[in-house]
Image (cartoon, rainbow, N blue to C red):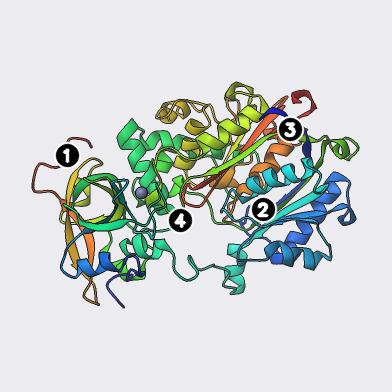
Amino acid sequence: MPARFEPRSTEVSEPFWRATRERRLIMQWCRPCEHVVFYPREVCPRCLGSNLEWRDSPGTGTVYAFSVHYRTGSPELMDRTPYVVALVDLTEGARLMTNIVGCEPDDIGVGMGVQVTWELLADGRHLPLFEPSTGSHGDSSRR
Amino acid sequence: MGERTLRGATAVVGVADAASPTGELPNRGRALEAAMIAEALDDAGLTLRDVDGVCHVGPSTYVGSSLGLAEYLGIRPVFTEGTNVGGSSYEVHLEHAAAAIATGLCEVVVCTYAETPRGDRNRGIDSEMPLWIGYHPEAEWEAPFGLWQPMGPYALAASRHMAQYGTTPEQLAQIAVSTRQWAAMNPRARYQSPITVEDVIDSPVLLSPLHRLDCCLVTDGAGAFVLTSAERAADLAKPPAYVLGAASCHDHDMISQMPDITVTAGAVSGRRAFDMAGITTADVDVLMAYDSFTITALLHLEDLGFCAKGEGGSFVEDGKLGPGGSLPMNTNGGGLSYTHPGMYGMFLVVEAVRQLRGECDSRQVPGATVAVAHGAGGALSAMGTVVLGTREAL
Ligand SMILES: [Zn+2]
């Protein structure tokens, strides 16, 4: 059994996953709107234009919401419970689903600063996970 | 809305539903749907020959579900509706059918739903639909992280609501407690024994911050309703439940794309439906608000304007949603305690109509003239609001 449900990529998201092979988080931006687009799309959801480019993400953000999963419907994650599923707001504005790792579930709170870390997938790609930030990002007093 | 309002143009004239304290029903599939349609038509004093429109969506059906149903019944409808937005599909079907009848496309529409997850399991029938057919963004951007469906999105919403507004687990629990009080008066409810806030808090946390008793049931269930023009409704068997307002709105598909996880599209559908009906929250005698989880119902209370955003917790904690309270909510016992086969929205309409007719025995809300059925589908994605009223409310 694979360690993870392997993310299915598409033609448009392929650059995102290719960058994860080098443990790089990149985000799609609309040039005219100067707006981050996530998940990756063929067109910008603001202007429907296709003038999009990839930029490096600082990989920092804050926890928007989270749930400690004491149970799971994912067979490949059974032996990892409890694990934490979260929505993280990246500094540049995108929101993505992820897991928070590198700390006890009880130490996680909404508003906590986090930074990207990586889990190797079977095919050499990496999955972007997040851990408590070592810098001063976020506001960890908001519990 | 100007002259294009649906207000008072149509009415629900027949209803039926099936549920059992065992959580199981003896039949399933088309046979169960046909039985519900027969019962709802009989309730209305109509026959299948009167039907010229059909709405259907249910499990194990991707496309053509209304086609298959009509074929099974041997009817040739001129209006068909198979929109699948999850649990609120039946509120959306009612809205669309009301618009179709009001504009003369058809005259008598039946809508039905049957799903029997427990019975199917006993029979060894795999009726579970795959989450996606082919590529779906969820398979790329959510599933790898192990978000457990369908509970996960609601757990995330609850965590955010608690952090942002100070909502407590005890306040959410009170919704389950009040709902169970109603279920105690419904002899067909799956769970009828009273529970306390402590019972909810002591039940296991599966996905924080939600407890087992914050979650809806998994039961067999089925239902149907019949909608027709106000003119035709006047001559039928039961007092009409007039459609005073109906509206829907959706703002995302997967939860990670929801703009603000504490504000649903019900803020839009609710306002539009209430405006069409010409009512405010103070006019609502019975609220049927989709309770897949306690947090779902709490968000509805805020988004429909019964209290301000963020104040749902303190709003519910005095028990006002229960019997004798100022806002009777989910009087059938809800998805939390009555039945929840998967797409619960059908039962909201059925109970709202029965309350307006005074058919609810010990759980009847005295003198109810306005009832709201507010459905939620997907991952807090698609909201459908229907305002129903008696002749006095017209
Ligand atoms: Zn753009």
Foreground disc of the pair 3, 2? 3
Do the dots labelled 3 and 1 sit on one chain? no
Question: Quick check: can you spot residue B204?
Answer: no
User: Which chain contains the residue that carries disc 3?
Assistant: B
Q: Residue at horizontal 29%, vertical 49%?
A: A94
Q: Residue furthest top?
A: B282
SS class, disc 1? loop
Q: Secondary structure at mark 3?
A: helix
What amino acid is labelled 4 in the image? Pro
**C-alpha distance separating marks 3 and 2:** 20 Å
For disc 1, the marked residue is A140
> Residue B118 at what x, y percent from top left?
58, 63
Give the Cα distance between marks 1 and 4: 29 Å
Q: Are marks 2 and 1 in contact (CB under 8 Å)?
A: no
Say which element carries label 2.
loop
* Separation of residues labelled 4 and 2 (CA atoms): 22 Å
**Which label number is shown at residue B19?**
2
A7 shown above or below A132: below
Tell me the residue that label 3 is attached to: B356
Q: Quadrant of the N terminus of chain B?
A: top right
Question: Pointer 3: residues within 10 angstroms few (<14), some, or many (20+)?
Answer: many
**Residue at the disc numbered 4:** B150
Provide residue B299's location: percent of width, then percent of height. 46, 37
Q: Looking at the picture, how far across and down is residue B112, in whole percent? A: 71, 55
Q: Are marks 2 and 1 on the same chain?
A: no
Pointers 3 and 2 in contact (CB under 8 A)?
A: no
Q: CA distance from mark 3 to mark 1?
A: 50 Å
The disc at residue B394 is none
